[in-house]
Image (cartoon, grey):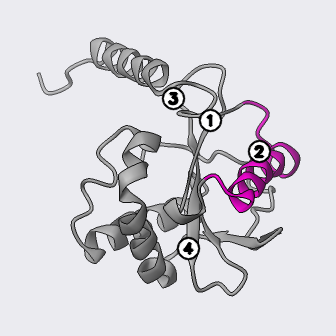
Amino acid sequence: MNVYTKIVPDEFDVPLLVYGNGFILQPLSPKYANIDYEAVMESRPILKDIFSDDWPDDIKSWEDNLRYIEEDYSDFQQRIGFSYIILDPSESRCLGCVYIFPSLFEGYDVAIYYWLHINILNSALAYEIETFIRKWVQEHWCIPHPAYPGRDIPWPEWLQRERKTFAGTIANSTDVSK
């Protein structure tokens, strides 16, 4: 069970199809499981540096990846997290993904993570996508204070905040089993 609340109000029109210059964003759903899995596996060497956690090391199979996609799609439908696949214009190739998740930290409304396929890194298209994501969030989402962990905020700093937050949560919780 997810304990997060909605990160956008009910009246906010969540984008379902977004066209960029040379790419398309759509909600990451099970229908994209094949091309997403292929892109994750091909880009695995660089993803660990971007996300600094167990993902994608814990993806051992197509089915494991599908479970992640199903969870993300459920979060999208509940408006508690938004995962988008970045597609080429023919919608046959995954160029990466964008994730908009609640932030646990004061001062940030959401944490925005994204990765790009290893084959487009350091390209004009990669620059176009990265620039587009920030502008799109700023102009089209009702999110005044986004965080970009691993990009604007170094991973060690973000992870240290995370550890402090979880340690404080555990220390302040009460044992109701007594």
Query: Mark 4 = which residue?
Result: 94
Query: Mark 2 = which residue?
Result: 134
Judge from the rendering whether residue 96 lies leftward or rightward of residue 143; answer left or right.
left
Give the alpha-carbon distance from disc 3 to disc 4, as whole Å. 29 Å
Query: Mark 3 = which residue?
Result: 104
Give the alpha-carbon distance from disc 3 to disc 2, as whole Å. 20 Å
Please determine whether, in this image, residue 153 is positioned above or below residue 164: below
Give the alpha-carbon distance from disc 1 to disc 3, as whole Å. 13 Å
The answer to which quarter of the image holds residue 162 is: top left
Q: Nearer the viewer, mark 3 or mark 2?
A: 2
Amino acid type assigned to the residue bearing label 3 in the image: Leu
Amino acid type assigned to the residue bearing label 4 in the image: Cys
Give the alpha-carbon distance from disc 1 to disc 2, as whole Å. 9 Å
Query: Mark 1 = which residue?
Result: 148
Q: Indicate which disc, 1 or 3, sits on the residue closer to the N terminus.
A: 3
Q: Which residues are magenta?
A: 122-145
Mark 1 and mark 3 in contact? Answer it, CB < 8 Å: no
Q: Indicate which disc, 3 or 2, sits on the residue closer to the N terminus.
A: 3
Whether residue 134 appears in magenta in the rendering, the answer is: yes
Numbered marks: total: 4
Judge from the rendering whether residue 34 lies leftward or rightward of residue 140; answer left or right.
left
